[in-house]
Image (cartoon, rainbow, N blue to C red):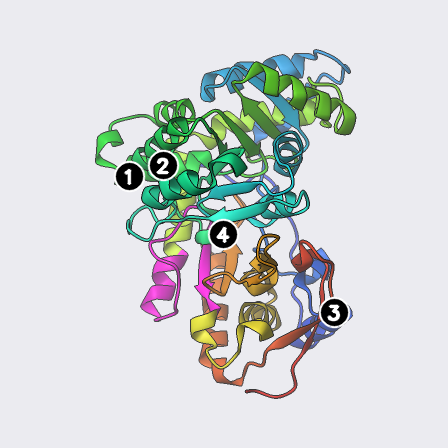
Amino acid sequence: MEPFKIKSVEHIRITTREERIDALKNGNYNLFNLPSDMVMIDLLTDSGTGAMSDEQWAAIMTGDESYANSRSFENLSKVVNEIFNYNHFLPVHQGRAAEVILSTIMINKGSLIPSNNHFDTTAANILVREGTPVDLVSKKDELFKGNIDIEKLDAFFLKNHERVPYCMVTITNNAGGGQPVSLSNIEEIYKTCQKYHKKLFIDACRFAENAWFIKQREDAYMDWSIKEIVKKIFSLSDGATFSAKKDAIVNIGGLLLMNDKDLFEKAKNELILREGFPTYGGLSGRDINAMAVGLEEGCDEKYLEYRTGQVSFVHDKLVEANIPIISPPGGHAIYINAGEILPHIHPMQYPAQAFSLECYIEGGIRSVEIGSVMLSFISPDTNEVIFPELELVRFAIPRRTYTQSHLLYVIDTIISVCKRANTIKGVRITESPKLLRHFSASFEWITTIP
């Protein structure tokens, strides 16, 4: 059962199919453009959409709004020092701000950044500085599909040593199906980085969920506590970016953490220019207080068991219905393989986008495309279009927000859409920006089925 009671509820507007079709048309067939009250179940993201606890709301009321060195910052510092394993940290308003600062101080034109899979904003921050994100995810481990292929990483460093400022690993691996990274793999990545005198940064958005999978699936750590595993993870790296909107269960906030003092000074100067004083980093004191409490709650093992159990429940029901899905399930979302469901739609007609639109029409569920719209890009090195391997639709489950009844409704909706898959048409982009086009692109239906 859920390890909490529900204390407050939010009204859901029940819409009709016709209303949803009109809303899509008005939003240029981009789910990001929908008014929130036109969405019945919102699984667009798990970032900043969770339900805060009574302890977090109480912390909001005691936030210290002093400009410099507030009590709220002291509260956060105590928790950060307990959970993470770095010499220095800066609060930022969200993980994206940490990515901007890190890439600004470390990436130059021609830089190559290896990772398991770069997510959208991580890749965009590299590309905008004329660097290239390079995905080296392993295909060897069924339980830890987020792992980096160590042989490929070593060969990559050997060939491109001078062009690599740092390596990154995302835990859990969002663009690759929310899959975890093993602790043994993190250790091997770190050793390989040290061999070539490169820094390793962890994209730590879902570090607690990743630690839970290590505890469940990696024999050497089954008797360790979550916090012990987390300490070990971060000891095998030089720094981290962190969006607190995930595993700290807050609506806004993040961290940039590192060991190198000189690098930290550069980061601090960037933060002062862009975000604010180093002890508030663009956040109010009340939000910093809520983040401190949320970091503790996000590491609670009973909560993590419930959290990952929700995702497993949806995954298992869809597998029973023979829906193509990324398996085993990750910790924050299910990923439907739209390319397999809609083989008649070419990647340039964006099958994952088409599938996500149909799920909204069918049941008012908002999801997000993680395929050729979001992840394809033109390589600065070769000028070729790089496409993702899979056309996925992610249904991200907000923390402590939806009940099993909601999830059963989601399952029924996905199954209904799959049953009429051969009637689904592709879409084309009519207008989009160069980077991060999935946020604001406009689409239209292609009138004929190939």
* Amino acid under disc 3: Asn
N-terminal of the pair, mark 3 or mark 1, is: 3
325 part of magenta stretch: yes
In depth, the one of 187 and 248 nearer the eye is 187
Task: Give the number of the disc on residue 175.
Answer: 4
- Give the magenta part as a residue range: 314-338
Residue for point 61% across, 27% down: 290
Residue at the disc numbered 3: 28
Residue 414: horizontal and vertical position, in percent?
48, 69
Task: Give the number of the disc on residue 311.
Answer: none
Residue 67: horizontal and vertical position, in percent?
77, 16
Q: CA distance from mark 2 to mark 1?
A: 6 Å
Residue at the disc numbered 2: 212
| Disc 4 element | helix
N-terminal of the pair, mark 3 or mark 4, is: 3
| Disc 1 element | helix
Q: CA distance from mark 2 to mark 3?
A: 40 Å
Does residue 311 appear in the picture of this structure? yes
Q: Is residue 7 left or right of residue 322?
A: right
Q: CA distance from mark 3 to mark 4?
A: 25 Å
Q: CA distance from mark 2 to mark 4?
A: 19 Å
Which quarter of the image is occupied by the N terminus?
A: top left
In depth, the one of 70 and 195 nearer the eye is 195
Residue for point 52% across, 15% down: 87
* Amino acid under disc 2: Trp
Residue at the disc numbered 1: 216
Which quarter of the figure has residue 66? Answer: top right
